Amino acid sequence: MKKTITIIAFCIASVGFITAVISSSEQWGEIDEDRYKRDYEAEDDDYAFLDGLGFRPRADVALVENAVYSSECGSCHFAYQPGLLPADAWEQIIGQLDDHYGDNASTDERQAAGIRDHLVENASDRADLSRSQAFSSVQTTANLLPRITQTRFFRHEHHEIPERYVTANEDVRSFSNCQACHRNADAGVYDEHQVFIPGVGRWDD
């Protein structure tokens, strides 16, 4: 009888401990997110001041400087910087806008040509920034369009992140959703020390 009571008491204590750990984890997740917003997002308003001191994060890849590309492509998804893929990959993507990863992204020939020129001229294998050049090696599958997530550098930088943190995360859903975790992605900043995965917290490997 005493043995049974001891086992029941142990089980109750275990459940209480696990509940406390889960509650604590959720609490710390909220604290971590608040800290991120305070330490990083708040700095956006101070960039003008920090620029003078040389503290502003430097862009890892060159900015998008084509209004047509920003409006045409950026209206459906994040306007990926040209330095995230090599020239031949961009050529292939622009050459198949009628079947753009399952969607029809066709535009008139003049706009398509302007977008193509911007992407190719600033592609990873033609860029000055070393981070961009690292994206020049991309693994492609026959008859499928190249993807930034298939570049060797991208795979190297993200291989330690559990897939469930992304694909099962309602606020992220895909590794191609760069700006979800890289809050300054639109500024070309992919600093690993500024990565914040929604619902998970800061990630610094």
Image (tube, helix red, strand yellow):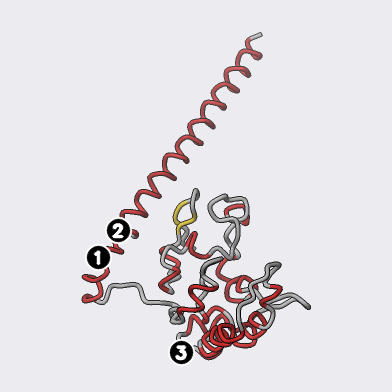
The picture places residue 100, in percent across and down from the top left corner, at 67, 72
Look at label 3 and name its amino acid. Answer: Asp
Cβ atoms at labels 3 and 1 below 8 Å apart: no
Q: Secondary structure at mark 3?
A: loop
Separation of residues labelled 2 and 1 (CA atoms): 7 Å
- Labels 2 and 3: the sequence-earlier one: 2
Tell me the residue that label 1 is attached to. Answer: 46
What residue appears at the point 57 percent right and 53 percent down from the top-left corner?
165
Quadrant in which the N terminus is drawn: top right
Q: Secondary structure at mark 1?
A: helix
Tell me the residue that label 2 is attached to. Answer: 42
Q: Quadrant of residue 195?
A: bottom left
Image side of residue 11 versus residue 35, left or right: right
Separation of residues labelled 2 and 3 (CA atoms): 30 Å
What residue appears at the point 52 percent right and 81 percent down from the top-left corner?
82
The picture places residue 29, in percent across and down from the top left corner, at 44, 45
Q: Quadrant of residue 52?
A: bottom left
Cβ atoms at labels 2 and 1 below 8 Å apart: yes
The picture places residue 35, in percent across and down from the top left corner, at 34, 51
Residue 2, compared with residue 101, is above or below; it is: above
* Residue closest to the eye, 24 or 3: 24
Tell me the residue that label 3 is attached to. Answer: 128
Separation of residues labelled 3 and 1 (CA atoms): 28 Å
Q: Secondary structure at mark 2?
A: helix
Look at label 1 and name its amino acid. Answer: Asp
Residue 16, compared with residue 36, is above or below; it is: above
Cβ atoms at labels 2 and 3 below 8 Å apart: no
Q: Residues within 10 Å of mark 2 (few under 14, many from 20)?
A: few
* Residue closest to the eye, 103 or 199: 103
What residue appears at the point 65 percent right and 79 percent down from the top-left corner?
93
Look at label 2 and name its amino acid. Answer: Ala
Image side of residue 110 versus residue 50, left or right: right
